[in-house]
């Protein structure tokens, strides 16, 4: 089938590559010419395991192409996927300007029936707005061509995106038109083989399902972070509490890790946007407000712990950071906890030496050259001349370092573990103080 994907970011590229992989003829379109030039030159602008190989394979096979030509995109696919960004507006609600701009383009250029598929995370009611925008653009040129707008939210996780797309837990299709539902079922058939994972529902429920999924995951994290602060204050160990509660199958072990706050391109903005949606219809979503407030506070926690350790005297101190990405296996730093910490340290007059296995290029892109930020080639070099170590991302390679080598390089023997990934007995056996989340400091 012929498929067009508007937006060549994390979601657009993975969707495009995976749909091409199973034999579709895919054209990915983006307004960012630099990105498209890179892709046409065989480079992939983001880090996502397996993506580069899959893109290369499918471009070579002639099933995947990239263009900045929006009209060509509209002419190409029966399916017109919208996978553009929906960043937060000033008040936290989802900014739909990119989504609606694609809708206008489709309305201006379509010559025949099109199925427009909203893959971006968009508030309830957006499919209606997209359809309206397309019809307006059609009316402006005096045509009235049939179309359907479907909600098909994406649930992939960065770092495991290919696997998630190829073997999804579920594919949600929101449509009021059974024929369109069947066409989407045919498109997704190769990903739906062992048992039926495709759920057809009404458009608004599909749109809300995406926000509901992200909001409940964010709630689990904020709940554990709230609990970790209580545990620390009362002298309990949140890690033992975590193991104790996760054994109940109604609770489970997934997504109950305490840490220094959630980030990324989805949870923060989606919790905020859902809260704004509720407010707009006159409902005060107090749980969602609390989830966000707890996360905001949690992102300050490591800075407070570091500052307390040094008696507030951070001027001239050097802090080594392991991990810059908002989570492992991605280079995405949108709303990453590392950013808040670095900015607070700089504000306090400290400087940062940092290492991340893949997010250094992204860090350079965001912060440019600055005298208070040194990016190093490996994790031990980051420690040279540093007063303390802080761990921000739970990369596997940070879990069991040579603790004696860490101790030898640090000016002050202290590790602030924002993800509770180290074995505290090993840290303390090497003669360092271990400060983690939800547990008293261990000398
Ligand atoms: P992204 O910022 O990585 O990519 C968006 C791309 O859209 C950019 O390359 C941008 O240049 C392009 N774009 C903007 N306007 C355009 C236009 N008019 N025509 C064509 N291209 C245009 O975003 P992303 O992380 O891929 O997220 C896309 C959507 O998917 C968002 O709504 C997001 O919430 C949702 N989502 C993201 C993830 C994730 O893990 N990143 C997971 C599920 C859902």
Image (cartoon, rainbow, N blue to C red):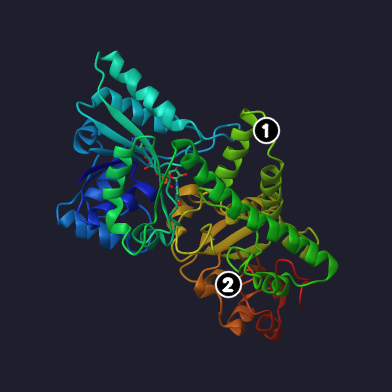
Question: Going 79% across and 66% down the picture, which residue do you hit?
Answer: 232
- Secondary structure at badge 2 equals loop
Q: Quadrant of residue 148?
A: top left
Label 1, on which residue? 283
Is 1 or 342 nearer to us in this picture?
Answer: 1
x, y percent for residue 286 = 71, 41
Is 26 or 348 nearer to us in this picture?
Answer: 26
Question: Going 56% across and 43% down the picture, which residue do you hit?
Answer: 269
Residue lying at the far front of the rendered structure: 178
**In the shown orientation, is residue 71 left or right of residue 124?**
left
Disc nearer the start of the sequence (2/1): 1
Q: In this picture, is 187 found above or below 180?
A: below
Q: Which mark is residue 384?
A: 2
Q: Quadrant of residue 233?
A: bottom right
Observer able to see residue 412: no
**In the shown orientation, is residue 161 left or right of residue 388?**
left
Question: Going 61% across and 82% down the picture, which residue do you hit?
Answer: 403
**In the shown orientation, is residue 434 left or right of residue 186?**
right
Observer able to see residue 150: yes
**In the shown orientation, is residue 24 left or right of residue 273?**
left
Q: Quadrant of ligand 1?
A: top left
Q: In this picture, is 300 found above or below 405?
A: above
């Amino acid at each position: 089938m012929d498929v067009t994907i508007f937006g060549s970011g994390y979601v657009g590229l993975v969707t495009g590559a995976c749909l091409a992989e199973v034999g579709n003829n895919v054209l990915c379109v983006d307004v960012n010419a630099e990105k498209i030039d890179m892709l046409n030159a065989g480079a992939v602008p983001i880090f996502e395991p397996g993506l580069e190989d899959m893109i290369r394979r499918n471009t070579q096979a002639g099933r995947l192409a990239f263009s900045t030509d929006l009209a060509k995109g509209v002419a190409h696919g029966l399916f017109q996927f919208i996978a553009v960004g929906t960043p937060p507006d000033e008040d936290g609600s989802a900014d739909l300007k990119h989504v609606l701009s694609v809708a206008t383009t489709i309305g201006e250029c379509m010559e025949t029936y099109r199925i427009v598929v909203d893959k971006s995370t968009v508030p309830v009611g957006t499919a209606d707005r997209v359809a309206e925008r397309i019809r307006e653009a059609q009316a402006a040129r005096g045509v009235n061509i049939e179309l359907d707008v479907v909600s098909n939210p994406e649930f992939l996780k960065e770092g495991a995106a290919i696997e998630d797309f190829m073997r999804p837990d579920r594919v949600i299709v929101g449509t009021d038109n059974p024929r369109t539902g069947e066409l989407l079922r045919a498109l997704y058939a190769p990903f739906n083989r062992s048992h039926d994972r495709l759920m057809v529902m009404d458009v608004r429920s599909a749109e809300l399902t995406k926000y509901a999924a992200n909001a409940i995951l964010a709630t689990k994290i904020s709940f554990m972070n709230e609990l970790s602060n209580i545990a620390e204050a009362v002298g309990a160990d949140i890690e033992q509490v975590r193991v104790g509660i996760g054994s109940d199958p109604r609770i489970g072990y997934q997504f109950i890790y305490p840490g220094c706050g959630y980030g990324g391109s989805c949870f923060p903005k989606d919790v905020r946007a859902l809260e704004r949606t509720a407010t707009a219809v006159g409902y005060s979503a107090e749980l969602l407000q609390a989830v966000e407030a707890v996360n905001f506070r949690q992102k300050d926690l490591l800075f407070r712990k570091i500052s307390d350790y040094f008696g507030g005297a951070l001027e001239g101190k050097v802090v080594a950071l392991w991990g810059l990405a908002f989570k492992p296996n991605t280079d995405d730093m949108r709303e990453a906890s590392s950013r808040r910490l670095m900015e607070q340290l700089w504000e306090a007059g400290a400087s940062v030496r940092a290492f991340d296995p893949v997010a250094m290029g992204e860090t350079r892109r965001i912060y440019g050259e600055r005298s208070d930020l040194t990016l190093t080639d490996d994790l031990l070099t980051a420690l040279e001349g540093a007063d303390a170590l802080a761990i921000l991302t739970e990369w596997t390679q940070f879990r069991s370092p040579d603790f004696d080598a860490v101790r030898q390089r640090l000016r002050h023997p202290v590790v602030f573990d924002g993800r509770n990934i180290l074995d505290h007995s090993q840290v303390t056996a090497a003669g360092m103080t271990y400060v983690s989340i939800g547990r008293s400091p261990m000398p």
